[in-house]
Image: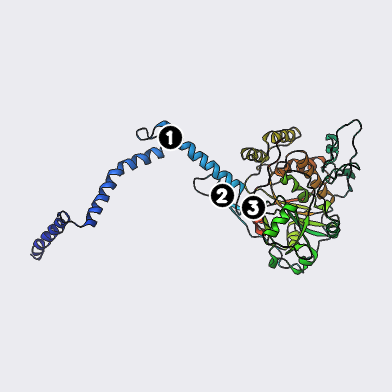
């Protein structure tokens, strides 16, 4: 009976509440709520149909025509391609790649931890290193005008014939082309000239960290001073090569040379009479030929100008060379590992004249270059494409020979050195089966752990069209 007493009291109240909702004097907020609910129910069937069509790969025939579909799809594809090109040109910090959902090439790369020694003070150069291949190298320093040739132009890399090029791959006592080739008296110098004072300074360096900025293509990145030991500050030469245009821009940026001609740790050396119009190719001179520029050096570290050194040079040499018993160390590429992929990428992004790329690549294939096979346990390298912005070298005969050979390929063919790395290494290895070259190709994330990567100020000048 208690239940029946409650019912009459409850029912009228509910009626009153519902009645208030439908009264003419409804509140404005209640009308908005009703309108939102009606819109939601109206569009629900359309949304369901769209979801079903997308899920099954269908097309919305009733709402969008086929021509409109093609237009939209094309815009999306062009947008994705532009984003992909920008990411490939300006890759961020890397190491382990993380793919964003639904984007094939949208990756982020991060540094990984590496076990550098804590202090330089206790480092001892190993005396029991592998017995590196020993032979003597001399270099062609002058070329005479061949008999019967009317027009002759001196070239920085010289004029090696294909026969001379073939012989140069043999690890034996020889004289080979390796840049800095002068012409006959009366001909202009072939370029990359230094002041005598700078030349004298560089001849004293035994351990070198070097970089370059040509054509005002980058900002000056100073090594992180607090990460560099007092020993390295006193005993390692930090040399930044620039042209006069870049030197003027550095002054405008506030980088004023001190009495020693330095900005921070960088000793700024001006290179005059640059040998190539293509600044990218000119940058290969200090990158590959440090053993020529620093004739007394025993070790060198190359650093692209888009990077800032964040570790002590001696710790780097100990980690990448001494600890692994290597004479040359370079990282693999963060994304691509086969030269075939690198060729397609260079052509797709118009990195160089495509005809010149085809000529170079066809020549390499005819001379034995094969695709990279990651499943082959006998593959001599973990990748056939390097990330060449960071190189650590012991200036051994085999290391110097490889550097000369690699430079000669850049001089003869395209300036895209990633295209010629694998061919040069594999041919050198194939030509000298009993004379090993101890190359350490390390992970790209290790490179990023010791040098911070930035974007270029501007892109270097494009190469001249052949």
Residue mark closest to the camera, 2 vs 1: 1
Nearer-N-terminus badge (2/1): 1
Q: CA distance from mark 3 to mark 2?
A: 22 Å
Residue 177 visible within the image: yes
Picture residue at 67% right of the left edge, 59% below the top: 253
Residue wearing tag 3 = 457
Report the mark closest to the observer, 1 or 3: 3
Residue contact between numbered discs 3 and 2, judged by CB atoms under 8 Å: no
| Mark 2 crowd level (few <14, some 14–19, many ≥20, 10 Å Cα) | some
The circle on residue 305 is: none
Quadrant in the picture for the N terminus: bottom left
Which mark is drawn over residue 69? 1
Q: Which residue is mark 2?
A: 107
**SS assignment at label 3:** loop
Q: CA distance from mark 2 to mark 1?
A: 29 Å
Mark-to-mark CA distance, 1 and 3: 39 Å
């Amino acid at each position: 009976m208690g239940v029946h007493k409650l019912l009459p009291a409850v029912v009228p109240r509910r009626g009153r509440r519902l009645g208030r909702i439908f009264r003419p004097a409804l509140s404005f907020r209640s009308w908005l709520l009703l309108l939102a609910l009606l819109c939601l129910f109206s569009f629900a069937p359309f949304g369901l149909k769209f979801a079903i069509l997308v899920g099954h790969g269908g097309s919305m025939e009733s709402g969008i025509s086929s021509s409109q579909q093609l237009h939209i799809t094309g815009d999306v594809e062009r947008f994705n391609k532009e984003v992909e090109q920008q990411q490939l040109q300006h890759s961020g910090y890397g190491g382990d790649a993380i793919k964003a959902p639904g984007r094939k090439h949208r990756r982020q790369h991060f540094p990984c931890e590496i076990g550098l020694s804590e202090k330089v003070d206790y480092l001892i150069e190993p005396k029991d290193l592998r017995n590196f291949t020993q032979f003597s190298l001399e270099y062609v320093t002058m070329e005479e005008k061949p008999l019967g040739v009317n027009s002759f132009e001196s070239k920085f890399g010289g004029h090696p014939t294909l026969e001379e090029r073939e012989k140069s791959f043999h690890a034996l006592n020889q004289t080979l082309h390796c840049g800095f080739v002068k012409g006959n008296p009366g001909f202009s110098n072939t370029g990359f000239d230094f002041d005598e004072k700078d030349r004298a300074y560089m001849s004293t360096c035994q351990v070198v960290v070097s970089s370059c900025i040509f054509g005002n293509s980058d900002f000056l990145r100073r090594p992180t001073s607090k990460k560099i030991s007092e020993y390295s500050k006193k005993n390692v030469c930090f040399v930044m090569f620039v042209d006069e245009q870049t030197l003027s821009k550095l002054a405008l940026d506030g980088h004023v040379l001190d009495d020693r001609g330095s900005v921070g740790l960088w000793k700024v050396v001006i290179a005059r009479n640059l040998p190539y119009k293509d600044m990218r190719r000119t940058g290969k001179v200090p990158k590959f030929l440090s053993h020529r520029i620093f004739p007394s050096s025993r070790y060198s570290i190359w650093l692209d100008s888009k990077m800032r050194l964040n570790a002590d040079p001696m710790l780097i040499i100990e980690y990448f060379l001494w600890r692994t018993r290597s004479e040359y160390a370079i990282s693999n590429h963060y994304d691509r590992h086969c030269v075939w992929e690198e060729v397609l990428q260079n052509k797709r992004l118009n990195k160089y004249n495509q005809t010149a790329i085809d000529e170079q690549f066809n020549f390499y294939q005819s001379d034995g270059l094969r695709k990279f096979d990651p499943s082959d346990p006998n593959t001599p390298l973990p990748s056939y494409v390097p990330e060449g912005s960071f190189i650590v070298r012991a200036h051994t005969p085999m290391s110097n020979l490889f550097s000369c050979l690699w430079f000669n390929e850049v001089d003869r063919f395209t300036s895209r050195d990633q295209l010629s790395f694998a061919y040069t290494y594999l041919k050198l290895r194939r030509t000298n089966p009993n004379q090993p070259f101890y190359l350490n190709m390390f992970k790209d994330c290790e490179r990023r752990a010791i040098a911070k990567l930035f974007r270029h100020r501007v892109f270097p000048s494009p190469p001249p069209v052949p």
